[in-house]
Amino acid sequence: MVHFLLFYDLAPDYLARREAYRGVHLRLAWDAAERGELLLAGPLADPADQAVLLFSDAAAAESFANNDPYVREGLVTTWRVRSWTTVVGDDAATPVRPA
């Protein structure tokens, strides 16, 4: 499995505005998780200015962002998908062990 990180940059008023869209956003996220596309997700804390979502597929990450009400309604100011080379851990895509 290859991993992809979806990074969200959050608007300064994200916490104040998210409640109106949170139910739809969470349903979208849990649906993606149930399909095995979204592995982990959540906002960074202190400050809550970014969020990181771990996907198993780049197209799924892009589709998620394009359909997320947080993006459509401006709670997310910019987003990007990056391939993540995971090398340590049980779920690492390309495990590298010490010699």
Image (cartoon, rainbow, N blue to C red):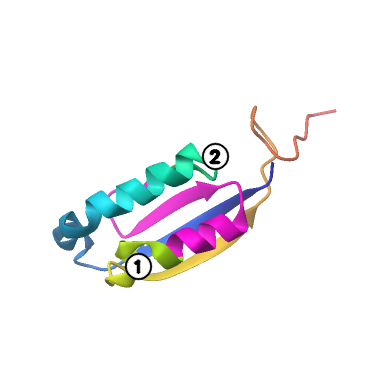
Considering the image in quadrants, where does the C terminus appear? top right
Seen at 42% across and 44% down, the residue is: 31
Task: Note whether 93 is above or below 6 in the view shown.
Answer: above
The answer to whether 44 is drawn above or below residue 33 in the figure is below
Between disc 2 and disc 1, the foreground one is: 2
Q: Is residue 41 visible?
A: no
Q: Which residue is mark 2?
A: 36
Could you tell which of marks 2 and 1 lies nearer the N-terminus?
A: 2
Q: Amino acid at mark 2?
A: Gly
Taking the image as shown, residue 71 lies to the left or right of residue 23, namely: right
Dot 1 lies on which element?
helix
Task: Give the spatial CA distance, label 2 vs label 1.
Answer: 22 Å
Q: Which mark is residue 71?
A: 1
- Please tell me which residue is depicted at 67% across the width and 36% down the height of the picture: 92
Give the magenta range. 42-65
**Residue 58 included in the magenta stretch of the image:** yes
